[in-house]
């Protein structure tokens, strides 16, 4: 006799939590995420369907395979993963588990998901993040991003949190987490899009302008090719 797991028919999609790295397309027109373990080479959007990372033609999640999206039930368990060195620049995602899923003790493996909220941690300097900047690595066609304050952006490719949410689309909310971060006037976190996000975007633009002005001033110094020497 073959035992079968009980079927669930929830009235609304279950909620789960996971971590991922935010990514920006090479042309800067799309935003998404890439996983931190299995399937990390395949960036996904806010609303996405899973496929078998081994190239098998079965539907995900398959009982005899470990393909499919993964998440945990408990937010604290997902946050704990952000403590490891390799995951410090990742963001915390709150997702809706859609389609077929397999429930485990600690989480789900499932066929489809919608990312509802992305919580961005502090900049590497400890300040609350104003945006996401080039992390120095990526996937083919995609740049990985990391939390950054306005002062640390410099000349790197970057987007504000509000701009990332717009590029990702599908109702994604991106917020700056304050746990473990230093507060800076004008860059405090909020759940609502509005003045704080605009202020953060302006701070990013100002930081870039300051960096370009510094580089321009250096080029104009004698002996740096900025003008004729006597």
Image: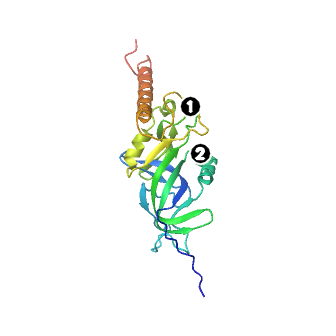
At numbered mark 2, what does the secondary structure look like: helix, strand or loop? loop
The spot of residue 142 in percent (x, y) is 43, 50
Q: Distance between the Cα atoms at labels 1 and 2?
A: 19 Å
Q: Nearer the viewer, residue 90 or 182?
A: 182
Q: Residue furthest top?
A: 230
Label 1 or label 2, whichever comes before in sequence order: 2
Can you identify the residue that label 2 sits on?
Answer: 88
Looking at the image, residue 155 sits to the left or right of residue 121; the answer is: left
Which disc number belongs to residue 183?
Answer: 1
The spot of residue 211 in percent (x, y) is 45, 27
| Disc 2 packing (10 Å; few <14; some 14–19; many ≥20) | some
Q: Residue at x 56, y 33 (%)?
A: 127
Q: Residue furthest front?
A: 11
Q: Is residue 165 above or below residue 111?
A: above
State which quarter of the image contains the N terminus. bottom right
Q: Is residue 112 visible?
A: yes
Q: Nearer the viewer, residue 79 or 223?
A: 79
Q: Nearer the viewer, residue 148 or 92?
A: 92
């Amino acid at each position: 006799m073959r035992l079968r797991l009980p079927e669930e028919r929830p009235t609304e999609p279950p909620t789960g939590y996971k971590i991922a790295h935010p990514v920006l397309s090479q042309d800067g027109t799309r935003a998404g995420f890439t996983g931190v373990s299995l399937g990390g080479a395949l960036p996904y959007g806010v609303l996405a369907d899973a496929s078998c990372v081994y190239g098998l033609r079965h539907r995900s999640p398959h009982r005899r395979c470990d393909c499919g999206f993964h998440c945990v039930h408990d937010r604290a368990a997902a946050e704990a993963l952000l403590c490891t060195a390799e995951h410090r620049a990742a963001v915390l995602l709150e997702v809706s588990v859609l389609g077929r899923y397999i429930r485990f003790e600690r989480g789900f493996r499932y066929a489809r998901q919608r990312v509802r909220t992305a919580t961005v941690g502090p900049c590497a300097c400890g300040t609350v993040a104003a945006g996401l900047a080039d992390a120095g690595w990526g996937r083919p066609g995609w740049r990985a991003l990391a939390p950054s304050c306005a002062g640390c952006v410099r000349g790197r490719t970057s987007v504000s949190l509000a701009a990332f949410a717009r590029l990702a689309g599908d109702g994604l909310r991106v917020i700056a987490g304050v746990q473990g971060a230093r507060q800076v006037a004008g860059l405090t976190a909020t759940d609502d899009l509005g003045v704080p996000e605009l202020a953060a975007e302006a701070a990013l633009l100002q930081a870039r302008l300051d960096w370009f002005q510094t580089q321009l001033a250096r080029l104009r110094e004698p002996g740096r090719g900025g003008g004729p020497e006597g």
